[in-house]
Image (spheres, grey):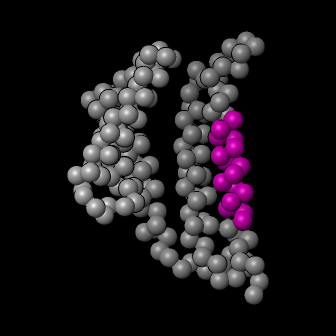
Amino acid sequence: MKDGEGRDLTVEYGVPIFFGVWAVIGWWAILRDSYVWSDFGLDPGPVLMPLLVLSLLSIGSLAMLVRAVMLTRRGGVFTRNLLRNLTVPAAFAGTVLLMVPLMYRIGFLATATLFAFGWMVVLVEAWHGAIWRRLLGILVATALGVGLVTYVFVDLIRVPLP
């Protein structure tokens, strides 16, 4: 049996496609923003971190995609439904994109709380036992997480949130 023969390719293609889409969205955003490309003298300005992150994300996605193609050539097969496996990541990406306009309508705290609580409910692994105890844990984790993010950005870094 050759390396990769019979291997499930669903995740092998799904992961680089997922991260590749985020890289494309990121490149599209920074390439259209003239402010980040302004001359800031010796300071590289606000474009440095997005350039580094998007470059690494793009290179990593491409490397994973090349690996998936190589595994396909070695006899890998799709044993699961790719689209069904991508529903949760696609839903996550959609809710992240919806957060921005929602923040301007109802504010950061309400949006972040809805987002965090909703995704913790979706992603919790063990729903056995008392449902009220599980929901209470999710509520506490949501409050702590959103509170910590708000404290760090508003009070420590002094970033105004919508």
Which residue is rendered at x = 32% and y = 61% of the image?
127
The answer to whether 157 is drawn above or below residue 138 in the figure is above
Q: Is residue 98 visible?
A: no
How many marks can you see? 0
Residue 132 in the figure: left or right of residue 47: left
Relative to residue 67, is residue 125 drawn left or right?
left
**Extreme bottom residue here?**
1
Question: Where residue 1 sits in the image (x, y, percent)?
Answer: 75, 87
Answer with the quarter of the image where residue 66 lies.
Answer: bottom right
Q: Nearer the viewer, residue 161 or 152?
A: 152
Q: Position of residue 28 (x, y in %)?
A: 56, 39
Who's the residue at 29% across and 52% down the image?
Answer: 134
Residue 2, above or below 130: below
Q: Main secondary structure of the magenta part?
A: helix
Q: Quadrant of residue 76?
A: bottom right
Query: Which residue is depicted at the point 65% across and 30% down?
Result: 49
Question: Quadrant of the image for the C terminus?
Answer: top left
Choose between 122 and 35: the one closer to the eye: 122
Quadrant position of residue 30: top right
Give the percent coordinates (x, y) of residue 87.
41, 61
Q: Give whichever of 11, 17 is nearer the camera.
A: 11
| The magenta segment | 52-67
At 71% from the left and 73% from the top, the residue drawn is: 71
Tell me if residue 154 is in the magenta stretch.
no
Camera sees residue 12:
yes
Residue 57 location in percent, x, y? 65, 46
Extreme-left residue of the structure: 132
Q: Left or right: where does residue 51 sit relative to residue 112?
A: right
